Amino acid sequence: MTLSTVCYRCGAEYGATIARCDCGEPLWFDRTTDFTWPDAGTGPGLWRYHEMLPTSAPEGIARTVGGTELVRTPRLDDVAGCQIHIKDEGQNPTGSYKDRGSAVAVPHALEHGADVVGTVSYGNMAMSTAAHAASMGRECIVLVPSDIPPSRLELIAQYGPTILQVDGDYGGLYEEALRLNKALPVQFLLSDAPGRISGYRTAVYELYESLRPETPDAIVAPTSSGGLASGLWRGILDLQGAGIIDQPPRLYLVHVAASDPITRAFVDGESEVTALHPNEVEETIAHSIGNPDPPSGTRALNAIRETNGAALSVSDEEIREAQRQFAQHSGVCVEPAAATPLAGVISLTDSGEIAADENVALFLTGTGFKELGVGNDPVEIESVARSDLEAWVESTIQ
Ligand SMILES: *Cc1c(COP(=O)(O)O)cnc(C)c1O
Ligand SMILES: [Zn+2]
C-alpha cells in the first residue's frame, strides 16, 4: 500500500518519503484507516497496531519494540502530588522510545527505494537506527557534528554503522541530510521522519488500551526536537477521529531549561517556535534533549495548545533529584532526559495545573543504564570488619 504524507498545518499532500512541506512544516502519515482496538493476542509489540502503520513487521528486533507495560507507581504519587502511571520506554531493545520510530521507519525506507539508511545524532537516535539497520542486514550512516564527546561513540559503534564526523553544527547537518535524501538512494531518518512519527503514535494507543475503561487526564513527556510530541499528538488525534476519546488528555512537554525554545514560544504566546542563538543555550546533563532548533517545534506547540496542555522547563538540579526519586520510589533507572516528566509534574501539581486525583501518564523515554559506571556520581560506602558485621547488620535492621 502506498500512502501519502500530509501537512498538519496546510493540508498539502506529498509522496511517502518526503519529510517536509513546502510551507516549512514537517509531514506525517494520514490515518490509514479508522482506529479500532485490535483483537486480543495481536502482536508482537507495536505491530499490534499494524493496520495504522505504513509498513509491516520485518524479521528481527523490530518485533521486540513497543508493548511496554503501563505501571501504576503509588510511591511516586507522594512525590508527584497526583496519580502516577509510568510508561517505561527504556525497555525497548536499544533502551529508548526511539526504537518505536526506527522499527517502522527503517523497513519503510528500504521498501521505498533506499539501499542505505542513516541519521544525524550521537545519542539514542543513532544507536536505534544503527541497530535496526543491522538487524535487517543493511548499511547505516551516522553523521555526527564535530564537537561530540568520544565516550558516546562506543554505544553507537557496537552496531557497526559508518560514523562520519562532519564539520558544522547539528542544524546544518539536518539540512544536508535532507538534501542527500533527494540526491542519493539513501534515507536519513531524522527526528521528524514520517515513518518515525507513525511508530511513536502507537505509544498512545497502548496507553489507552492499558488504562481502559479509565482514561488519562494528562500525559507528560520530555521534548527536544518535537518528534515524540508529534507522535503523541497524532495518536491522540487518531483516537479522537475514531470516537474513542472525546476529551483529549492534556499534553505537557518538559524541556530542560538550558535549551528550551518550545517553552519560550509557548510562554510568549508565539505562533511559531524559533531557534535559540548559541549564546542562549547552556550545558546540561540532559544531553538527549538539548536541541536548540527543533524541526517539529511548531507542531509540538500546536499539540499542547490543541490539547490544553503546556510547555515548561526544569533545571538540571531538578532533573538529578527526579532521577533519584525514580530509582528510589519506583525502582526504575532513567537517563536525565527521561527524568524530566517527574520534575515537570511536581511543578504542575505545585501550581495547581494538575489536581491530586488526576491520572497522569509519564513517558520515561530512555534507560539510565547507559550512563552508569562513568563516575558521574561517586558513591560513598561504609567499610566494616568481618568481626563487626553481625552487629552492623543488626543495627541496620532496627
Ligand atoms: C530523543 C529523546 C527525547 C526527545 O525526543 P524529541 O523527539 O527529540 O522531542 C527525549 N528523551 C530521550 C531519552 C530521547 O532519546
Ligand atoms: Zn504545509
Image: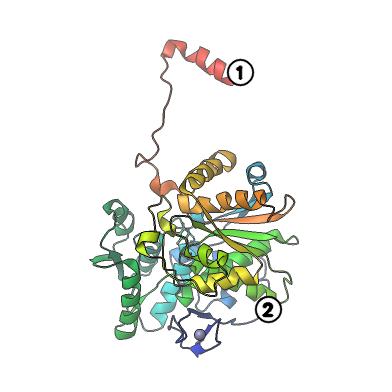
Foreground residue among 359 and 118: 359
What amino acid type should be assigned to the residue bearing mark 1? Gln
Q: Which mark is residue 209?
A: none
What amino acid does circle 2 point to? Gly
Residue farthest to the front, as pictured: 268
Res. 367 in view: no
Residues packed near mark 2 inside 10 Å, few (<14), some (14 to 19) or many (20 plus): some
Who's the residue at 55% across and 67% down the image?
Answer: 268
Q: Position of residue 287 (x, y in %)?
A: 40, 55
Residue at horizontal 57%, vertical 50%?
342
- Is tag 1's residue or tag 2's residue first in the polypeptide sequence? 2
- Residue located beneath label 1 in the image: 398
Residue 222 position in % (x across, y down):
52, 58
- Specify the color scheme: rainbow
- Front-lying residue, 220 or 127: 220
Tell me how far mark 1 sits from mark 2, CA to CA: 57 Å
Residue 334 in the image: above or below residue 122: above
Local SS, label 1: loop
Q: Secondary structure at mark 2?
A: helix
> Quick one: 110 or 294, which is closer to the camera?
294
> Is 326 placed left or right of 378 in the picture?
right
Image side of residue 338 versus residue 106, left or right: right
Local crowd size for mark 1, using a 10 Å CA cut-off: few (<14), some (14–19), many (≥20): few
Q: Residue furthest top?
A: 387
Determine whether label 1 and label 2 are within 8 Å by CB.
no
Task: From the image, tell me which residue sits under label 2.
Answer: 241
Query: Is residue 343 shown left or right of residue 244?
Result: left
Which image quadrant: the C terminus?
Answer: top right
Give the image location of residue 79, x and y in percent: 63, 42
Is residue 71 shown above or below 237? Answer: above
Ligand 1 within 8 angstroms of badge 1 C-beta: no
